[in-house]
């Protein structure tokens, strides 16, 4: 099909041909006239073809023309083979905005299309439309779309729900299951036209042995794709008609990711078959003011007619995100500006580690219980905990009226938010201690229900007002008001554990706590996941990835202080530090060093 600009002769031929079709009633003549119209449309430019199909043909005539197109191209939707955006708008009946159109149409003209995308710009929605378009514009049995992502959970729960929804809604042929789109062949058999999978990071054969006349590979969440898997995509793109759409947030903690290298290639004029089309959150129509169509993806509601801009990031979100993390934070660089952070951004805990820990699936099976199923008052959470797990609490007492008094609880590997408050009420040591006691009692009931062999352990930052709270709780333990073990932690002291051979050697106990939690969240190369499940609030997750990683002149590792963070306009990481206390165990492996003797 031609992609040149519409010519007057094509338009002049189409109008009378359509008029003849409109007034024809004899079947044989209808077929002949419809074939003539189809031929004119297939030879016209994209703009002329789409305009004519919508405005020069009636609803009665279109099915006849589409059947003739099917005879000529092998597909009922062959008119849209060179215009994915046209397919989405004309066939699916959905709305799009300018950069979405650019991305979809680039798949036709380039072998590799890389899209580093910010938050909330509809990248997974876009990838699903690309998949549905590709397998519907070629003859069934000749086209295959393969989708992949870092983890199978992302394939199954992020991309494929979009595909499963759009196929029946648009009345397209075939049906979808969890990660397969099956279409009927002319012989009446089911053909798997699209499927989703994920592969282990070191499986170099994952992309081999797949052959088809037309192949589209969609790499969703491309920022996390392992280099070996990424390089293996070349196996699918050699020979024949094959294309790839790689789309996702830029990696925040990998300065040499496969996706970043692909995006660099797309900006290199010496590699014309690869194109990079970034979409930052600042490109959102809600920010740029671009006029966009009304939303057709939401359920129809005459009392709530709105444009696509409602579903896009606005300036308020951008401002709040920058205020929460800081202008140069890797999260802001990647999620707002759709750029690749350089050098990891000097952050203690990479944002992707926390995001992963918040998305891990909860274990099930013998010995695992949902908290809400234990019949304990106030335990409404649905995540699972293990029989016999150790129950611990971390308490960060507010240092002043602007900070928060926070409590988090860990049950085995699962960390959960329990309490946060700010204001004058936290100035009362008695009220603070009574709230901690309330949480101790709940933790003890949980430990008893799980049959935990360990005492509930409560670690409290005893700097400032926390010292009095710690003393009060210790006294209540002596008078049998509770059975928990109270551990006061002075975060300004020297670290409990000091390994001279460690790569990161903490300067003070607070640094030690941050590095210990970093170690628990760091993914194991063999499994790809860390050792914690975080069932925490968004505020805590932001605070965990905010402090910078610093070093002193002696080579010791320092975590950015609360004072320095506040000077950058960031909030005190009280919730994050309650999580650290929850997980921290002050049991020395080596004797604490003494200042002045060891620098």
Image (cartoon, rainbow, N blue to C red):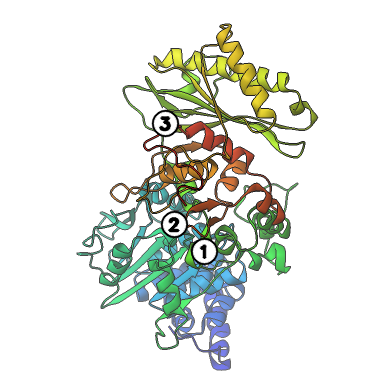
* Residue tagged 2: 172
**Between 186 and 131, which is closer to the camera in this rendering?**
131
Are circles 2 and 1 on residues that touch, CB within 8 Å? yes
Q: CA distance from mark 3 to mark 1?
A: 65 Å
Q: CA distance from mark 2 to mark 3?
A: 63 Å
Q: Secondary structure at mark 3?
A: loop
**Between 560 and 261, which is closer to the camera in this rendering?**
560
Are circles 3 and 1 on residues that touch, CB within 8 Å? no
Q: Is residue 220 left or right of residue 208?
A: right
Q: Please give the label number shown on residue 91.
A: 1
Tell me, yes or no, if residue 375 can be seen here. Answer: no
Residue drawn 63% across the image and 32% down it:
406
Residue 114 lies, in percent from the top left, at 45, 71
Residue 142 lies, in percent from the top left, at 28, 68
Q: CA distance from mark 2 to mark 1?
A: 9 Å
Residue drawn 56% across the image and 14% down it:
441
Residue occupying the far front of the picture: 597
Q: Secondary structure at mark 1?
A: helix
* Residue tagged 3: 587
**Between 300 and 105, which is closer to the camera in this rendering?**
105
């Amino acid at each position: 099909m031609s992609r040149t600009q519409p010519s007057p002769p094509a338009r002049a031929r189409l109008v009378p041909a359509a008029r003849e079709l409109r007034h024809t009633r004899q079947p044989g003549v209808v077929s002949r006239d419809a074939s003539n119209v189809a031929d004119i449309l297939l030879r016209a430019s994209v703009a002329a073809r789409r305009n004519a199909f919508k405005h020069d043909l009636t609803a009665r005539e279109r099915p006849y023309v589409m059947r003739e197109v099917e005879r000529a191209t092998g597909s009922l939707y062959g008119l849209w083979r060179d215009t994915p955006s046209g397919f989405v708008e004309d066939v699916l009946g959905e709305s799009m905005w300018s950069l979405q159109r650019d991305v979809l149409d680039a798949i036709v003209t380039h072998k590799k299309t890389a899209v580093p995308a910010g938050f909330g710009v509809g990248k997974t929605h876009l990838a699903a439309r690309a998949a549905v378009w590709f397998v519907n514009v070629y003859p069934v049995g000749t086209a295959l779309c393969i989708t992949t992502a870092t983890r199978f959970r992302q394939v199954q729960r992020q991309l494929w729900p979009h595909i499963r929804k759009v196929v029946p809604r648009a009345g397209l042929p075939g049906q979808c299951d969890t990660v397969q789109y099956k279409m009927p062949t002319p012989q009446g058999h089911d053909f798997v036209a699209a499927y989703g999978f994920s592969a282990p990071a070191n499986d170099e054969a994952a992309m081999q042995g797949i052959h088809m006349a037309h192949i589209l590979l969609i790499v969703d969440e491309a920022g996390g794709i392992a280099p070996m898997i990424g390089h293996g995509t070349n196996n699918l793109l050699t020979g024949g008609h094959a294309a790839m759409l790689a789309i996702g947030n830029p990696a925040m903690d990998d300065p040499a990711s496969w996706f970043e290298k692909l995006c660099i290639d797309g900006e290199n004029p010496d590699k014309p078959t690869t194109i990079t089309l970034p979409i930052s959150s600042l490109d959102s129509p809600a920010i740029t003011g671009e006029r966009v169509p009304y939303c057709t993806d939401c359920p129809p509601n005459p009392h709530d007619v709105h444009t696509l801009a409602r579903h896009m990031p606005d300036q308020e979100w951008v401002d709040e995100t920058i205020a929460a993390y800081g202008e140069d934070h890797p999260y802001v660089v990647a999620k707002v500006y759709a750029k690749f952070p350089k050098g990891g951004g000097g952050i203690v805990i990479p944002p992707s580690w926390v995001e992963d820990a918040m998305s891990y699936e909860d274990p099930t099976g013998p010995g695992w219980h949902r908290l809400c199923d234990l019949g304990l008052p106030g335990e409404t959470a649905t995540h699972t905990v293990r029989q016999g797990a150790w129950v611990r609490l971390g308490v960060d007492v507010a240092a002043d009226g602007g900070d928060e008094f926070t409590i988090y609880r860990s049950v085995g590997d699962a960390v959960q938010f329990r309490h946060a408050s700010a204001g004058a009420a936290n100035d009362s040591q008695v009220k603070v201690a009574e709230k901690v006691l309330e949480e101790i009692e709940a933790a003890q009931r949980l430990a008893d229900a799980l049959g935990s062999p360990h005492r509930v352990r409560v670690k409290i930052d005893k700097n400032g007002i926390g010292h009095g709270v710690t003393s009060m709780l210790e006294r209540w333990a002596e008078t049998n008001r509770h059975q928990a073990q109270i551990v006061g932690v002075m975060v300004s002291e020297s670290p409990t554990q000091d390994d001279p051979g460690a790569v990161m050697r903490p300067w003070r106990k607070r640094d030690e706590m941050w590095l210990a939690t970093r170690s628990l969240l760091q993914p194991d190369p063999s499994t790809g996941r860390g050792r914690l499940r975080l069932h925490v609030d968004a505020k805590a997750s932001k605070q965990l990835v905010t402090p910078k990683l610093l070093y002193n002149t002696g080579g010791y590792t320092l975590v950015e202080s609360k004072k320095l963070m506040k000077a950058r306009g960031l909030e005190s990481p009280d919730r994050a530090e309650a999580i650290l206390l929850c997980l921290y165990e002050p049991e020395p492996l080596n004797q604490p060093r003494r200042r002045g003797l060891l620098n």
